[in-house]
Amino acid sequence: EADIYQTPRYLVIGTGKKITLECSQTMGHDKMYWYQQDPGMELHLIHYSYGVNSTEKGDLSSESTVSRIRTEHFPLTLESARPSHTSQYLCASSEAGRIDNSPLHFGNGTRLTVT
Amino acid sequence: GNSVTQMEGPVTLSEEAFLTINCTYTATGYPSLFWYVQYPGEGLQLLLKATKADDKGSNKGFEATYRKETTSFHLEKGSVQVSDSAVYFCALINYGQNFVFGPGTRLSVLP
């Protein structure tokens, strides 16, 4: 039973379009993350947030941007989609603070195809 | 820095075979260790975890023991089923840092 929701599940869009991938969680978690998963399965952290009004870039450089205006919501935006953005995008959340062994909770992902 | 290495896949087994997926890590201090599983078309799910040396995590017949002396956290299951076919990720987290994932190991179980 998912407590973290991503929409849409699948998106096919043309080059140059602006897109927003939605992610919401109902667990009250402070930390949220976006991962990009390539076809070889490897996960790459592209953005994360410690809480409201906090956003940080991850290990993999990305042309996307994120915002965190509400605790439960962490959308990812691409201003101008390109075929190189074709990938699976996974959103996750975890408890923050000193509970550093708390696990990540993942959504089911958005599979983006840019034509 | 922190890193996780997993055995390369794909791993193909027959139903009821014994499974081992090796995982070793490099980290300073005392990380917590995790195994996640990703079924086709889904996100990752926590399978099991261990937070200190010699801890054994277990769930759904899977087990892994935190071995600090060998910096390992190998995943095992005594008898796999077709429904265990998935991608398995070993991961660690260290205090104040983000999760570090291994590259994933794809498991296929044949009936």
Image (cartoon, rainbow, N blue to C red):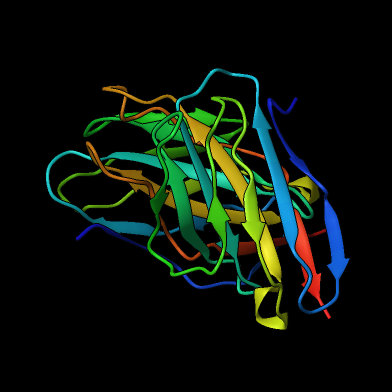
x then y, percent, for residue B82: 79, 51
Residue A56 horizontal side relative to residue A75, left or right: left
Residue A40 horizontal side relative to residue B94, left or right: right
Q: Residue at x 30, y 23 (%)?
A: A97
Q: Relative to B8, is A25 above or below?
A: above
Q: Residue at x 85, y 61 (%)?
A: A11
Residue B83 horizontal side relative to residue A107, left or right: right
Q: Nearer the viewer, residue A74 or B87?
A: A74
- The number of numbered discs placed on residues in the rendered structure image is 0
- Quadrant occupied by the C terminus of chain A: bottom right
Q: Nearer the viewer, residue A62 or A101?
A: A62
Residue B9 seen anywhere in this rendered image of the structure: yes
Residue B110 horizontal side relative to residue A23, left or right: right
Q: Nearer the viewer, residue A40 or A3?
A: A3
x then y, percent, for residue A81: 71, 73
Residue B85 seen anywhere in this rendered image of the structure: no
- Quadrant occupied by the N terminus of chain A: top right
Q: Residue at x 54, y 25 (%)?
A: A71
Q: Residue at x 75, y 59 (%)?
A: A19
x then y, percent, for residue A96: 37, 26
